[in-house]
Image (cartoon, rainbow, N blue to C red):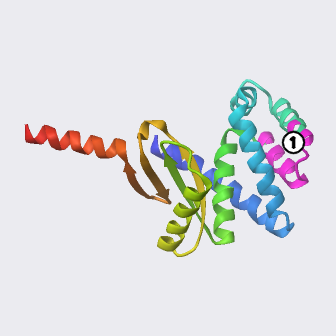
Amino acid sequence: MATDSSGVAGLAGRYATALFELAVEAKAVDAIADDLEALRTLLADNADLQRLVRSPVLSRGEQTKAVLAILDRAGAHDLTRRFVGLLAERRRLFILAAVIDAFEGLLAEHRGEVRAEVTSARALSGEQLGRVEALLRKVIGGRVVVDAGVDEELIGGLVVRVGSRMVDASLRTKLQRLQLAMKGVG
């Protein structure tokens, strides 16, 4: 199973790299990034589009026609249209979300940015988010883009992920550690 997921990641990475290089060559990196972000939102919010992307029942032609119609309606850049059309023709739409993730990683690297996922029990205010970003910038020593999320089960505190590193300073984790320590005493 692990080789399957790494194969998809590898495949998605190759497609994302090709798209990124074409976008740089066409001087359309920002336009393509905007298109892909809009496409990610559509995928997340639309169950019918998710079925279209994953369905082995639909023919290549049907999938291609449908995704190109969606991209036309959204006013996507020609390169985005051609790229997603190619994925559909090659029956690779199922990796679209992974391609978007890989493209964003390449874009962040190109811009010299580091992405940090910050999860809190409640939505952070603009001031709180600014303080977290400033602290991360100080620790990392570069530009940081913070993706803020909410997980009410954390109870309080934060969970911060930067690359493969994670700092869990949530109240939920502290309570779990205390519970384990108490079991060891009794």
Q: Tell me if I can see residue 91 in this picture.
A: no
Q: Residue at x 85, y 32 (%)?
A: 66
Residue lying at the far left in this picture: please name it.
Answer: 186
Magenta residues (range): 70-89
- Residue 91 lies, with reference to residue 24, above or below; the image says above
Q: Tell me if I can see residue 11 in this picture.
A: yes
Look at the image and say whether residue 172 sits in the magenta stretch. no
Residue at which label 1 appears? 71
- Tell me which secondary structure the magenta stretch mostly adopts: helix
- Residue 135 lies, with reference to residue 40, above or below; the image says below
Q: Residue at x 33, y 44 (%)?
A: 173
The one nearer the camera, 48 or 143, is 143
Look at the image and say whether residue 85 sits in the magenta stretch. yes
Residue lying at the far bottom in this picture: please name it.
Answer: 141
How many labels, in total? 1
Q: Position of residue 169 (x, y in %)?
A: 38, 52
- Residue 159 lies, with reference to residue 105, above or below; the image says above
Q: Position of residue 108 (x, y in %)?
A: 65, 64
Q: Quadrant of the C terminus?
A: top left
Q: Residue at x 44, y 51 (%)?
A: 159
Q: Residue at x 73, y 30 (%)?
A: 46
Q: Position of residue 156 (x, y in %)?
A: 42, 44
The one nearer the camera, 137 or 61, is 137
Q: Amino acid type of disc 1? A: Leu
Q: Position of residue 15 (x, y in %)?
A: 70, 54
The one nearer the camera, 92 or 174, is 174
Residue 24 relative to residue 73: left or right? left
Q: Residues within 10 Å of mark 1 (few under 14, many from 20)?
A: many
- Disc 1 element: helix
Residue lying at the far top in this picture: please name it.
Answer: 57
